[in-house]
Structure formats: C-alpha cells, structure tokens
Amino acid sequence: MADRYEHISVVIPAYNPDHQLIYIARELSRESFENIIIVDDGSSEASAPVFETLARMPSCTVLRHAENSGKGKALKTAFAYYSRRHPKGLGVVTADADGQHRPEDIKKTAEELIRQPDKLILGVRDFSEEDIPLRSRFGNVMTKMVVKVAAGMKITDTQTGLRGIPRTFTEELLEVSGERYEFEMKMILACKTYKRSIAEVTVDTIYIDDNESSHFHPLLDSIKIYYVFLRFLFSSLASFVVDVGLFALFSTLFKALMPMGFIIAATIFARVLSSLFNYLMNRNVVFRSYQYPARTLMKYYTLAALQMGASAGGVYILYHTLGGHEVPIKIGVDSLLFLLSFYIQRTWVFKNETSYVGEEVSDY
C-alpha cells in the first residue's frame, strides 16, 4: 500500500495552527502518505513548536512564508514545489489544517484521484444536515449560485478545501490570479478554461466550535466573488442611462427636422450608440476580452437581435395567454433574458477571455 500514494502529495496550508495539525500529519503518515507538504503562511511565534515538530517528521516538508500572504499564495507555493520535486507525480490532495478533514476522507479523495487522474476531485460535504452552521450553509448556497450563473457549473460544495488536483493542473493553476480565499473559487472556474472535468466524493461534515475558525465571510466574500456579475449589472444600468440621455438629445435635434418621425429616428440613433457603449463596457471592463473585436462585435449584435426578438415574442405570447398584465410580464421576461444574456456573453461572445471574480478578498 505504501507505493500506492508514492506519487501523491498532501498539501496543507497553515496559518497559526495548533497541535491538531501534528495529529493530522501523523495519521496521514500511518496511512502511507510519505509526501506531506505543509506551508507555514507567516504564522506567529506561538505556532513555532508545531512547525518544528512537523519539520522533524520524515514524511513532512515545511515551506515557509516570511509573512502572511493568503491561502491561494500558500497553495501556489506548494504546487510549485511539488512540480519541481515530483515531475512524474500524479497529483496532490489539499486539506485544511484545522482538523475539518479526516485522514480517512483525505485518503478517499486520493483514491478517487488515482481512479480519475485527469479530473479535479472535490471532497464535498452534505449541507442538508441540521447541525450545519448557518454561515457555512448560507456561504455555500451563495457561492453555488455564483458558479451556476457565472459558469454554468453545478457544484455541490464550492467551499471545500479537500481537493484532489492532477499534477498538470497544479502547473496550470500557477497562472491563475488570486492569492487569498478567492483562489479556491478560481480553481473551480479554471476547469472551464483548461477543459477539465470535476468529480465529487462525499466526505464527513465536521465543524469545530461551530466553524468559528473559518475566515470565510459569506456576504462580503460572496459579493467579491460575484464581482464580474456586479460589473455586468453596472454596465447595463450605465448603458440604460446613456440610451435615455441620447434619446432626449436626438429627440430635441430631430423634432424640428422631422416632426412626424423624430421619435423613431431618435430611438434608432440612441439605441445604436448606447449598444456600442454597452459592448465596449462589457468587452473592456466586465469580461476583459481583448482579442478578435470584429468577431465579438458580430456575436454581441447577433445576441442583441435575438434577445430583442425573444423579449417581444415572450411578452406577446404570455400577454395573450394570461389575458393582460403586460408590464409585470415585460419585467419578468426581460429579467430572465438579462441573466441569460450574462451567461451567453460569458460563455460565447467573450469566451475564454473572462475575468470571473474580484481580486481583493479576505484571508483564509
């Protein structure tokens, strides 16, 4: 069995850990994990005895950051070390340092990585249990929604730190931005970019002291993870203001020239310019896509035309089906199309050039 995990390392980023980390390392050693990479991410002097004990263990390698740099940076440090020292390795299993991942579940994740060596393996928890802390349940629901809307990916547990990562993916992840909590979310989203499938294994749900040690802040961090969608919302609102402003301007200019047709003319000119403004905002600010402007522009206006037709057709059909209520129907149809437009622009119009999440999030 010792040879079974020869090409798999366990990666544990640690910030101010207690003796629970020593227990985890010893149990993993008993489970025949001979390569355990622990990153001291600028911990205080109080944790020095823990790292000193770990450094004396033959199965452990302790890497150190001079100051706290964040979980994403710690993971990247471990990935770079693993890639250099184990060029023929199968991959790594990441785990948290606080005891929330049992050695048996780390082993289960490693076994799944061996069975599916090209996939990202997620050790997922069951959030339907009654004893799940409210902030953890809320945080998972929020980030699941983000991943579903932003990337069209259905993930059971987006926050899990227990992951099996192929060696080649660890090298690709070194190019993914983010040095703190958001890096784990970007890791999931990067599967789209690098065309990697995701597999899940169910693990025990363990929370210590109601998960008070977690540095994930559900509302704040979810808003930051949702940053690209908020930019899209802002772009749409700004384009609406530009459209109304241009309509008012052109109405004034054309009214004397064409009293019978100034409204249609003003509408067309305003819509053309405001849609171009919206395209430039989405391309340069929201999705940050800088290649193939002619292609993305054609796709954008194709989508805009289809969206306009879908809006008119949807409102028409529902109006005659329900027998009225055209304004609420219009709001409902256009809201749904707005979300659909975001997804299509992310996955088709500006494909492979998307910036998914914000850069500034809290530490782990």
Image: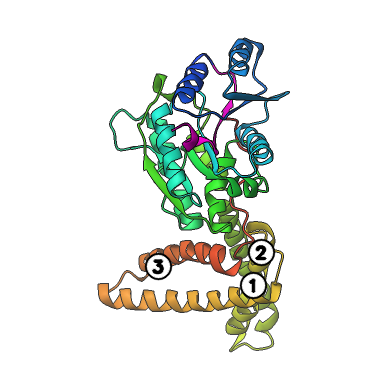
Q: Position of residue 149 (x, y in %)?
A: 47, 55
Q: Residues within 10 Å of mark 1 (few under 14, many from 20)?
A: many
Q: Nearer the viewer, mark 3 or mark 1?
A: 1
Structural distance between the alpha carbons of marks 3 and 1: 25 Å
Question: Mark 2 falls on what kind of element?
Answer: helix
Which residue is at the front of the view, 284 or 129? 129
Q: Amino acid at mark 3?
A: Val
Magenta stretch bounds = 1-17
Task: State the separation of the CA atoms marked 3 and 2.
Answer: 25 Å
The answer to which of 206 and 218 lies nearer the viewer is: 206
Task: Give the mark count.
Answer: 3
Label 3 Cα neighbours within 10 Å, binned few <14 / some 14-19 / many ≥20: some
- Tell whether label 1 touches label 2 (CB within 8 Å): yes
The three-letter amino acid code for the residue at tag 2 is: Arg
Question: Which type of secondary structure does the marked residue at label 1 adopt?
Answer: helix
Q: Is residue 3 magenta?
A: yes
Could you tell me residue 14's position as x and y percent? 58, 24
Q: Mark 2 or mark 1: name the one nearer the start of the chain.
A: 2
Look at mark 1 in the image and give the residue it sits on: 296
Q: Residue at x 68, y 48 (%)?
A: 175
- Residue 281 horizontal/vertical position (percent): 66, 62
Residue 161 seen by the camera: no
Q: Quadrant of residue 52?
A: top right
Name the residue that disc number 2 marks.
283
Residue 333: mark in rendering: 3
Depicted 135 relative to depicted 355: above or below: above
Residue 190 x, y percent position in the rendering:
57, 52
